[in-house]
Image (tube, coloured by chain):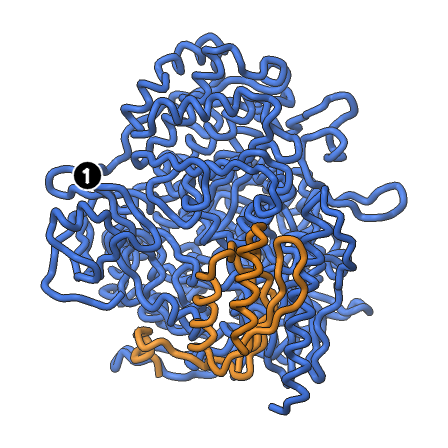
Amino acid sequence: MPVSGLNITITDKPHITSKLLENISRDPSFEIGLHEGNHLAVVLETNDAQQDKHKHRWLSQLPGVIHIDVVFIYFDEHGEYLSDSIGTCENMA
Amino acid sequence: MSLGRREFIKAAALSAASASIATQSSSLSASSTVSLPVVEEPPKIPGVKWDKAPCRFCGTGCHVMVGVENDKVVAIAGDQKAAVNKGLLCVKGYHVGSILYGIDRLTTPLLRNQKTNELEPISWDNAIDIAAKRIMQAPERFAFYGSGQWTIPEGYAAQKFMKGGLANNHIDPNARLCMASAVTGFLSTYGVDEPASCYDDLDHADVVILWGNNPAEMHPVLFSRIVDRRSKGETVKLIDIGTRITRTSEQSDHVMLMNPHTDLAIANCIIQQLISSDRYDKEFAEKHCNFRQDSDPAGLFGAPMSFDAYVKEIKKYTPEYVEKISGVSASDLRLLGELFADPSKKIVSLWCMGMNQHTAGTAINNLVHGVHLISGHWGKPGDGPQSLTGQPSACGTVREVGTLAHALPGGRIVKKKEHREQCEKLWNLPENRINSKPGYHTVKMFEQFCTPAATGGDIDCMFVQVTNPGQSLPNTHKLFKAKSKLKEKFLIVAEVYPNATTTLADLVLPAAMWVEKNGIFGNSERRTQQWFRQVNPPGEARDDCWMTIAIAHRLMELGHPGMKDRDGNFIFRVNDDDGNEVPAWKWEHYYDINVDRALFSEYRQFTFLKHKDVAPYDELVKSRGMRWPVIKDENGNWRETRWRFVEGADKYVEKGKGFQFYHSTTKDDKAQVWWRPYADPPEMPDNEYPFWLCTGRVLEHWHTGTMTRRVKQLAQAMPHTYLEMNASDAARIGVGQGDQVIVESRRGSLKLPVWIDGRGRPPKGSVFVPFFDELNQINDVTLHAYDPFSKQPDYKKCAVRILPVNSRKEL
């Protein structure tokens, strides 16, 4: 279950910002923290990497989001991952 | 995981995010009234121990806090204390911990069985013995290939082993393929390498000009500094001069799409306008600049040129003339000219591979420096040229330690007797140990390795550390894959994962990486950054530096005289506090002493000649990196330097000088403004191969993808490479989104899916392919023509044709 801390650069237009905060707070995966000027602190907690990716994409496409910086990430489990398309292992012992 | 622990982690995440906002608010905006406290301590999670490290990927040099539990990296946080990134990280940076844990980590030495062609496990003792004996067979036919991913001590050890030990200069790095043209650009302009400016400029500039540079994807944390200023209402004009629309273009005020290679004409056009309108900075030019042109025969430092002769040559580069060459409109060219003519504007030029991977790379580097020098937009905060690097220690290890075929540590070169003598003295070597003949640069080195000995291929054995030339070299059929047919050639590869290079390796040495070992990097703004080992490497993986020392010691045992200094001691002798030798060549004793500290302290002595004084190791331990020259002040504090050659900022500038280029090639404290005319590149589209091909990186993957393709999130976000194509070209040749095409050059071909109007959008007649994908290697197609001075190949342009195939792949 990945947990990430995000620093989101947001628009300075108040009517878009209030709608944005409403959108984010409606999703239980997100927890909103400090909102200072054009920056918003948010925690994202998801079940797996796939959901994490989808939530990031959703967030980045919301009106009013200019830029997302990830400043913290906790890995419950590491990927121990091998892409299907990595092909040189057959040459190894 | 218990709810309580989960809540702890969430609280830590929220605290880190809030702290980063506080840090940004307090440090980036001068007008901000925010007075939030900057939280500098890492998040508290029970059982997790935190320590600093620079990120493992690009040359930006972001610092991360690494959370370790039970000998495993479990969390990454942006480092609030780090001036480079102020707590922020890019998508690669926050996954950096996962690169250690790909399922196929190499964990034991492997030797290729010549009968079965399989790699089989062997012991470390055997592996070191085999490597040493292969080198001993013909030390002069051995080559060492590394990269800007070498830590400074690793590169220093490799450098000393080759040039001080084997008296062999065949050592070169992957950085030759990344930033060698920036090096020759700095050397021929200022007489000494590396940027005079720093990232602080991004916080002060009114205008940022991106010369073939896509920082939104390649250096995202630096780009976010600009985005952040703009989001606060500051005016920062972004001008993107490039050959395709990128994510950076999308946020730019002006996008100037140029024909490939014509940046030379554009830069000349800016200078032409300044001179013809008499609005160049006469005082700066007269006091601080000379004019220079090519010599005959051509040489890096050229020949003098009068200002009148320079004016005469550049006269024809009017906006109308350059519009025809470059495709950039005369009005846009005038806009650039007007900006540089305005002394009230602060202008930063940023560049990386777009200017460096160029057959005229030295020339375009000279020209961009020239634009800033002659306009006087130089040496003030927010006003100057700043080159970036793609590897984490391209500056620290390659440019400063000098792990290049012609170089010695600290800006010295093998050709100069006094430089060789200085090194022999510092290394306590017998006189004339160091060879005066430069070794092979990268392309030549691999050409010789992939040529049969019987037909002149005089490199028989090669050791590759911390890089993947099997995928990153240009024209790989010629420069790498040809090795597969040459049984007499022996390739030793130290690696963390199987990759394109290990595919042809005869001996594979499993390497420790990043926080599995001690290290020091040097980033793009002269910042030297230290970290400690925080977890153990898996299985039998070991430090690259140890491998070099162990092979050197075995060579000494085999009787190689170069592995001893003039007193008969091992050249890598390290002593404990009592003066007793520590057998660092034995792995079980390698961490009895801090070998990094010993090597760095020795290396530090080399850094004073060119005024690149790095800080003492123990000062680096306390800091998030320090920008050299680092000088001790009258109170005994070590002070870094933000702007070189500028009075008040650089302690080596004499009082009253204002600016002083104290390593000037003309010995008069002046920089050189070069006359560099536009000339066509060696290969251009024609009837047979009608498209330009440009190659590069993507946000999710770093370099050849060996590490990032093992991170699930990154691999899934960008699973395979593709070919970006303009919609009208696609319609013309009858291909749609996702259709497979063959991209073919005179050197090779590759089948790829087409991406139309995707992340990047090339103009008509041009295609782009990222090079991270091991199974679809675009470098089978690229050209290995290189810049005559830097020997850096051009990956950004060659001629290809695109042939439709009747199949489709999901993008």
Left or right side of A22 for B16: right
Which residue is rendered at x = 20% and y = 43% of the image? Answer: B691
Which residue is rendered at x = 51% and y = 22% of the image? Answer: B673
Instruction: Look at the picture and state if B479 lies above or below B514.
Output: above
Give the chain letter for orange: A
Name the amino acid type tagged 1: Pro
Q: Position of residue A41 (x, y in %)?
A: 63, 65
Circle 1 crowding by C-alpha within 10 Å: few under 14, some 14–19, many from 20: some
Left or right side of B326 for B437: right
Left or right side of B89 for A85: left
Which residue is rendered at x = 26% and y = 61% of the image? Answer: B481
**Figure quadrant of residue B676:** top left
Chain B palette colour: blue
Tag 1, which chain? B
Query: Viewer-proximal residue, A38 or B748?
Result: A38
Q: Is residue B595 visible?
A: no
Query: Viewer-proximal residue, A17 or B717?
Result: A17
Query: Viewer-proximal residue, B611 or B7?
Result: B7
The residue to which callout 1 is attached is B685
Q: Position of residue A56 (x, y in %)?
A: 47, 68
Q: Which structural element holds mark 1?
A: loop
Q: Position of residue B220 (x, y in %)?
A: 51, 53
